[in-house]
Amino acid sequence: MKHTILTGDRPTGPLHLGHYVGSLKHRISLQSQHNQTILIADMQGLTDNGHNPQKIADNIFNVMADYLAVGINPEETTICLQSALPALAELSMYYANLVSVSRLERNPTVKAEIASKGFGASIPAGFLNYPISQAADITAFDATLVPVGEDQLPMLELTNEIVRKLNAVAQQQVLVESKPLLSDVSRLPGVDGKAKMSKSLGNVITFGSSDDEIVKAVRAMYTDPNHIRVSDPGQVEGNVVFTYLDAFHEDKDYVSALKEHYRRGGLGDSKLKGILADCLINLIMPIRVKREMYLSDPAQLKQILKAGTDRANQKSQQVLSRVKTALGLNVF
Ligand code: ATP
Ligand code: MG
């Protein structure tokens, strides 16, 4: 079955290893068989960076370069820019009337983000609303499959609720429901061991990280606090270094042998961290070289983004028109 895939990223910084295992790997492997659109969600990026729009603007091409360097092929995947797609903002306005404020306030991901961002009582209205704009992003392309990390599940639930409500109001099938596609590592912890690697938390290894930065981040990783001498038996569960080896090392048998050795005692943290650092450097170094090459030619990046955005505008305007007609609003 051929799927229509929609997914995206906020241009709040260069992409990181969480994106890679949580979503990008799927996007790369699915792009040749399916109809895929990737959205650079700059408007969503502004919902918690309203006072710092330059940060969002500066990172659009960073994210573009990351996509191309990691293997997203613009001949197969439409890459587009959210703020240049007016249908998305319009759809959001219609959908906002189908969702209650308390429903938005109950969203567990938004709740956790509000707490970690320290908004206090000053939550930007746009931030509370961003799951609605995400529903607009997904439905504007008639997406059926959305490869995302686990943090996005509440957004997809809300999207399908909006789809069902709109179809009920219009008394016809206007929009289609979509399904999440989760990977084996749907929530990569940060290098600080915190629940999620995230640009906004700064606990990341990005595709732009230098070899030194990778080594430093791995050295600072949390292991087992009771594993003091090399000869001590160590704990694998909850040990961030092993979480990363499981996520990134290609030789699973080798990782199993390392775990056994660590549990038994005799495998030191610094040796183990050296193995992880080498593994991550092997993964990131070639991507970093390519992303620098793409970043050195912003005109090319702009042209690829413009071509994808033009295509995405055509599609999203069609869906907007369908929604307006179903609501009886296509007067002219
Ligand atoms: P921000 O902190 O600005 O929200 P982010 O690091 O959370 O940035 P997003 O742009 O919000 O990144 O997420 C883009 C996609 O990558 C989403 O599908 C999200 O689920 C996925 N993703 C992000 N971080 C992780 C992670 N640590 N593990 C798995 N998937 C992730
Ligand atoms: Mg996020």
Image (cartoon, grey):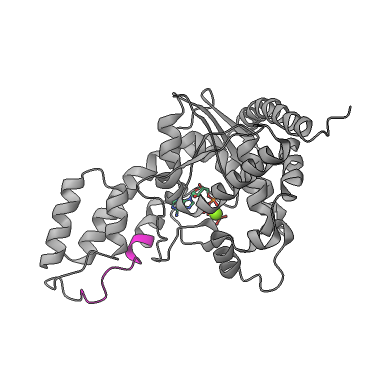
Q: Tell me which segment is drawn in magenta.
A: 217-227
The residue at the point 51 percent across, 61 percent down is 202
The residue at the point 35 percent across, 67 percent down is 220
169 over 234 or under it: above or below: above
142 left or right of 331 in image: left
The main secondary structure of the magenta stretch is loop
Q: Where residue 225 sits in the image (x, y, percent)?
A: 27, 75
Q: Where residue 119 sits in the image (x, y, percent)?
A: 66, 70
15 left or right of 222 in image: right
314 over 45 or under it: above or below: above
Q: Where residue 37 sits in the image (x, y, percent)?
A: 56, 32
Is 209 in front, or is 110? 110
151 left or right of 283 in image: right
253 over 224 or under it: above or below: above
The residue at the point 53 percent across, 56 percent down is 199
Looking at the image, can residue 266 be seen?
no
Is 34 in front, or is 276? 34
Residue 177: image quadrant is: top right
Q: Where residue 27 sits in the image (x, y, percent)?
A: 46, 35
Magenta stretch: residue 78 in it?
no
Looking at the image, can residue 96 be seen?
yes
Is 147 in front, or is 100? 100
